[in-house]
Image (tube, rainbow, N blue to C red):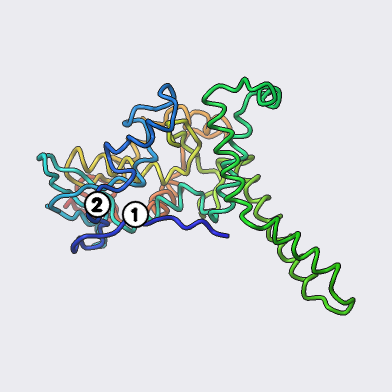
Amino acid sequence: MSTKRASKGKAGDTSGVGMASGGRPSGREGDTKGEENFVPAGLIAPKEEWMMRELFLAHEGVVEKILEDEKGRALFALIRVSDGPLKAQVSGELRDCMRQLARYGLPDEAQELASAFKRLNGLPANADSLVYHGELDASARLSLALIIQSFQRGLGNSLQEIERLRAEILESPLNDNKAENGFKNLRAKLKRRLNTALDTVLHPSSSRTKIKGDSPAFSLPWGPWGLCELMHPSLAAIIHARRFVEKEKRLPTKMELRNILEEEYKADMARWKQKNEKKRIADSTWSDIWKEAGLAGLKKESGDATSAKKGRKR
């Protein structure tokens, strides 16, 4: 059974830029009281380093400017908040793109199982003994609780349904194949979900989102405590583009954004170059990254909207 994600509401006409409706939704900048009550204090990462919050970042205030790309698509909004400074917010389209990239395009159930497998791998080698003797520290207890929660969400009622169908098979007439077919279909579906989750854990740099196979993965401080995870490069592109807009009050060019990513993720780039025995990422791969990020409409370079073929600067 799919776990539905609550979506943000929109207030006013922002030309495609998602705005928060009234109140103060969970995940808003500064709203961390619930996390502090639930997470051991030593595990809370500095907010600046926690990139998952970019998925929920929303500001209330007056939209002063909508920033559109060369194709007229709204990408970001500059919003004047109550205390004065301009804040940048992604469009609803970019936010949806971020959510899909953050999940590697996985269905919710498979993503929950993948999260459980990752956390399970992070437990101490003697976790079973520690559980038996009641010696788990707060961090491990929290991880164990989240593992159980993720397995419950990922499996849903699949196992109970399989047992129900198995019982029907035993009770049904020999010529009644309905329960048996339902059993086989559900079992196959569950196996595919588990295999997808395992593939995500074993091959974290690959993505179900279409992109060049030799594209790098960037290590982003993710999760509620800023633990680093290898994520899709297009997700990093959106996050750093928004931060650029908030700082410079304009859209970055592709070259500016590329320089930022190459600087921010030097270690990931170095590992990628060594693994693939290449000196640089191909321009075509960067083009795919911009496309998957929804940023293909950015100017290529300052003063040049698309390419040098125009023969003049704009």
- Residue 277 vs residue 266, the one in the foreground: 266
Left or right: 7 as drawn, with respect to 302: right
Q: Considering the numbered disc 2 on the image, is that residue within a helix, a strand or a loop?
A: strand
Q: Which residue is drawn at 60% across and 23% down?
A: 136
Q: Which of marks 2 and 1 is nearer the N terminus?
A: 2
Residue 144: x and y in percent read 59, 33
Q: Residue furthest left?
A: 84
Mark number for residue 76? 2
The foreground one among 225 and 144 is 144
The residue carrying mark 1 is: 94
Q: Check disc 2 and give the amino acid type.
A: Phe
Q: Is residue 239 above or below residue 292?
A: above
For badge 1, the amino acid type reads: Leu
From the image, which quarter does the N terminus lie in?
bottom right
Question: With respect to residue 183, does 106 lie above or below?
Answer: above
Q: Residue furthest right?
A: 174
